[in-house]
Amino acid sequence: MMSALRRETGDGADAGAPTSAIGAIDDGALGPVRDRLEAELAASPAVAGADAGHAVRGGDGVTGYRDSIFTTLAQARPVFTLAWPDHLYIPGQADHQQYWFVPPPDDHRYRYAYAGPPGASAADAADGRLFAWVNTSGLEPGYTGYAGVGARITPSATLAYLTIGADVDLLAEARWWYLPGTDAGYATFSYRAAVFVAAWLIDPVSGRWELLRPFATRTLLAFRESGQGGSAVVSQRHAFDDLAARVQVQAGRQYAVTASFEVTIAHDCRDRRGARYVKQPGDDIRLWASLTGQVASITASTTVLVP
């Protein structure tokens, strides 16, 4: 028979297990009360009567002892409420019943939507849909297409941590297809598509946003190609809600919490003389990438450091 106790580890361990026995008493709280009680009992004379020999006298010590036990044992029950979760932010026109029982306060819906460069990428605060797009098929200089949504937060605690997260569902796609004419020479291509979760400090005077660090990012698509050639469209579905960033915030300041999509294509295409290759009639070039999806919700949970 094994007599040694075995400590659970790995998947069998529960870090949330109780740290003390159910029957344990907080002697730190009751000890002084017991001392006063016993001092009073020792100083009280026995009460003569029908039950001679039994001390039946009460006093301040007994009352304090009784009240201290009630205070030690009594714990407030958690308040059951249907109020909107304070950490949850949703699109401006989203059906709140998909998230909670009651409607959210107006300031718990998305306030911001931004995208660039203009005319290609798009963002909608009403439904949380984002489209980040980049296309360098004309061999223009590479750039980043981005789209994001966000909400505004004004902390009440003097100093606190804000943990920001997002519920994201999207499709990442990209195409590399480079079949230029015979004058083309060396060429390299770099693709990247990522999701960002971040907080920004809003300047009360200028309205400008200052990015706070750290922010969180997850790269969904990244590859490099070189030379001439091509491949089928790369298409990947992603859904997650575990991307998070934690920043310090202060009372009296305004912040934006955001989730955004970004796609980038960088390339270096040269002709046989080493100059930048210019697309020619008849070239078959398709270089594009996109992130298309929805940020169904943004969360911003507060951990108070200084009330």
Image (cartoon, rainbow, N blue to C red):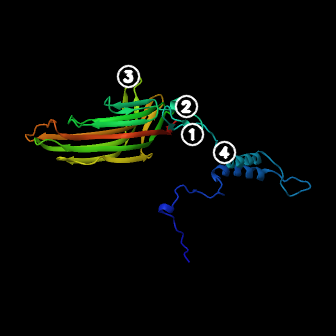
In the picture of the structure, the residue carrying the numbered disc 2 is: 105
In the picture of the structure, the residue carrying the numbered disc 4 is: 77
Per the model, the C-alpha gap separating discs 2 and 3 is: 27 Å
In the picture of the structure, the residue carrying the numbered disc 3 is: 206
Tally of marks: 4
Q: Looking at the picture, which amino acid does disc 1 mark?
A: Trp
Per the model, the C-alpha gap separating discs 1 and 3 is: 36 Å
Residue 100 badge? 1
Residue 277 image offset from top left, x and y in percent: 14, 37
Front position in the image: 84 or 5: 84
Front position in the image: 234 or 157: 234
Q: Residues within 10 Å of mark 2 (few under 14, many from 20)?
A: few
In the rendered view, tell whether residue 133 sits above or below residue 12: above
Q: Is residue 99 visible?
A: no
Dot in front, 1 or 3: 1
Q: Residues within 10 Å of mark 3 (few under 14, many from 20)?
A: few
Dot in front, 2 or 4: 2
Q: Looking at the picture, which amino acid does disc 4 mark?
A: Arg
Per the model, the C-alpha gap separating discs 3 and 4 is: 47 Å
